[in-house]
Amino acid sequence: MSDRLWTSESVTEGHPDKMADQVSDAVLDEILKNDPDARVAVETLLTTGAAIVAGEVTTRAYVDMADVVRKTLEAIGYSESAHGFAGGTCGVLLAIQEQSRDIALGVDDGGAGDQGMMFGYATDETEQMMPSPILYAHHLTKALADVRKSGVLPWLRPDGKSQVSVRYHGDQPVHIDTVVIACHHSPDVDCATIRSEVMESVVLPTLPAHLVDETTEYLINRTGRFEIGGPQADTGLTGRKIIVDTYGGLARHGGGCFSGKDPSKVDRSAAYMARHMAKNIVAAGAAKRCEIQISYCIGHAQPVSLVVETFGTGRVDDGEITRVLRETFDLSPRGIVEYLDLRRPIYLKTASYGHFGRSDPDFTWERTHRAADLQSALGL
């Protein structure tokens, strides 16, 4: 078996694109609190001093969206103008209209609201059934946020990125070759302090010791300074971190983003369902790796295709797994929403550090309670 490297990145909740995702999902959550049947598709753009929220909303509820936007940005950590952006004082522009009646015709009858394909993936290489590079990249960015919020590293500011390059021997991760960290910081800290304290408080406590050694390379704030961050440094836009949201590039992606979309949108709900099925296949011992593609047609309730790929690791033929999944799960948009209990205000917390591989009980798509059913149906 040959060795190969795979690299994945993550970004902190204070990264402009992730800020935009969180604003969109915060608006969605606030609407779902008051109207679980609402149709929501909103996107956010953030730039210096301004937040623009646009999209389609059909609801019986009233929501003070501007207030939701401001509170979300402040909770992320942008509460002072000294950070280059302040949620309490930035301009907020809303451009909201109702969902197209033509699209509603298909959704009202339980059909999909659009065509498209969605992917789900799982692997047995980690306890979370996630690829190692994206899992460890998320752990690093989450650790950056934790030490900032707790005051352990008071000079940290909200923006930041991580990147992890993992060496695989065959399908198994054997070594972390390179770790990249870029962290937003106050002007009164020097580069040497940044690098030493991030290593001590973030990197070393976070990465698995068995995968790092003296040959692992650590690249922290390689430009030397990262004082200007957030929307002041880079425009943020909903849906620009879809690979960060999913599997770090180690599985295919249909192209649709998740944030800002209510669960009637198959871009979100079917991707969650595909992950759920893939994870239960791996948990059942039917395969070591599993990728699932589902595709839909607008106005059509059942998927037009379902494809399983186990990359040669399956104990059962991929076609047989496909047949059993179709017989076991209701893959209509309405069936997925009901099965995963998705009409709840749970989406803001999905919008940073990945939608998959997390143990939050609200992430119903991460449960593996159907593994035994699949074992029985597959004769394992």
Image (tube, rainbow, N blue to C red):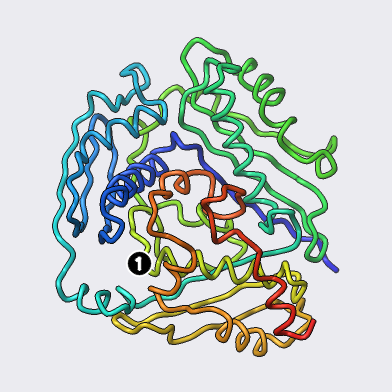
Q: Nearer the viewer, residue 207 or 65?
A: 65
278 relative position to 347: left or right? right
Above/below status of 124 relative to 190: below
- Which quadrant is the C terminus positioned in? bottom right
Quarter of the view holding residue 285: bottom right
Name the element at disc 1: loop
Question: Could you say where residue 186 lies in the image, as x and y percent from the top left?
Answer: 47, 16
12 relative position to 105: left or right? right
Above/below status of 84 relative to 141: above
Above/below status of 277 relative to 319: above
Question: Could you say where residue 265 lies in the image, as x and y percent from the top left?
Answer: 35, 67
Outermost residue, top direction?
188
Question: Could you say where residue 106 lies in the image, as x and y percent from the top left?
Answer: 25, 79
- Which quadrant is the N terminus positioned in? bottom right
The residue at the point 54 percent across, 70 percent down is 274
The residue at the point 20 percent across, 58 percent down is 56
Could you tell me how many numbered marks the image carries?
Answer: 1
Report the residue marked by disc 1. 265
Question: Could you say where residue 87 lies in the image, as x and y percent from the top left?
Answer: 29, 28
- Mark 1: give few (<14), some (14-19) or many (20+) Cα within 10 Å: many
The residue at the point 50 percent across, 53 percent down is 245
Q: Nearer the viewer, residue 162 or 136?
A: 136
Q: Nearer the viewer, residue 108 or 286?
A: 108
The residue at the point 55 percent across, 85 percent down is 326
Q: Amino acid at mark 1?
A: Lys
